[in-house]
């Protein structure tokens, strides 16, 4: 891909897909929040977060690992923040 506009077009398509997946993930987070509230569970599940981050680390190349981990940490932080607003 030598054409900058073509590269940007592909990035825009990926952004659209990522946004749709993010919205779906946040909707599922609302369901998680409702379950946790009904069952007296805390928002934070440290073991689950650690398992997710380990899987990300295991499935990402050295080149992108730190960025992928930061991306997932941020996404999980947003999810927890949203869950807290629903409790």
Image (cartoon, rainbow, N blue to C red):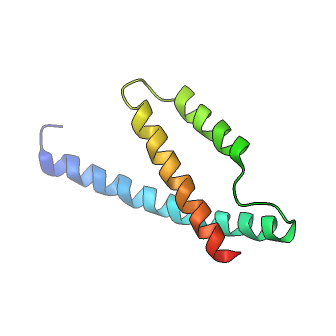
Identified at 72% across, 50% down, the residue is 45
Q: Residue furthest right?
A: 39
- Give the side of residue 7 with respect to residue 34, left or right: left
Q: Residue furthest top?
A: 62
Check the image and report above or below for 40 versus 59.
Answer: below
Which quadrant does the C terminus fall into? bottom right
Q: Position of residue 32 (x, y in %)?
A: 73, 63
Q: Is residue 62 visible?
A: yes
Q: Position of residue 15 (x, y in %)?
A: 36, 57
Q: Residue at x 39, y 61 (%)?
A: 16
Tell whether 30 sits left or right of 3.
right
| The image quarter in which residue 56 lies | top right
Looking at the rendered image, the quarter that the N terminus falls into is top left
- Choose top left, top right, bottom left or bottom right for residue 86: bottom right
| Number of numbered tags placed on the structure image | 0
Image location of residue 5, percent across then percent down? 15, 51
Report the front residue among 38 and 61. 38
State the image coordinates of residue 80 (x, y, percent, origin top left): 61, 61
Name which residue lies at 51% across and 54% down.
Answer: 75
| Image point (44%, 31%), residue name | 65
Q: Residue furthest bottom?
A: 86
Q: Is residue 80 above or below residue 14?
A: below
Q: Is residue 63 left or right of residue 75?
A: left
| 53 or 7: nearer the viewer | 53
Q: Is residue 20 left or right of residue 35?
A: left
Q: Is residue 25 visible?
A: no
Of the pair 26 and 81, the residue shown nearer to us: 81
The foreground one among 44 and 22 is 44
Name above or below for residue 27 compared with residue 63: below
Residue 18 sits in quarter: bottom left
């Amino acid at each position: 891909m030598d054409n900058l506009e073509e590269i940007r077009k592909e990035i825009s398509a990926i952004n659209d897909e990522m946004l749709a997946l993010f919205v779906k993930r946040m909707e599922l987070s609302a369901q998680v929040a409702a379950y946790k509230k009904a069952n007296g569970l805390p928002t934070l599940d440290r073991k689950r977060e650690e398992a997710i981050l380990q899987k990300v680390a295991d499935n990402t190349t050295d080149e992108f690992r730190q960025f992928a981990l930061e991306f997932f940490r941020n996404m999980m932080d947003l999810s927890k923040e949203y869950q807290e607003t629903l409790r």
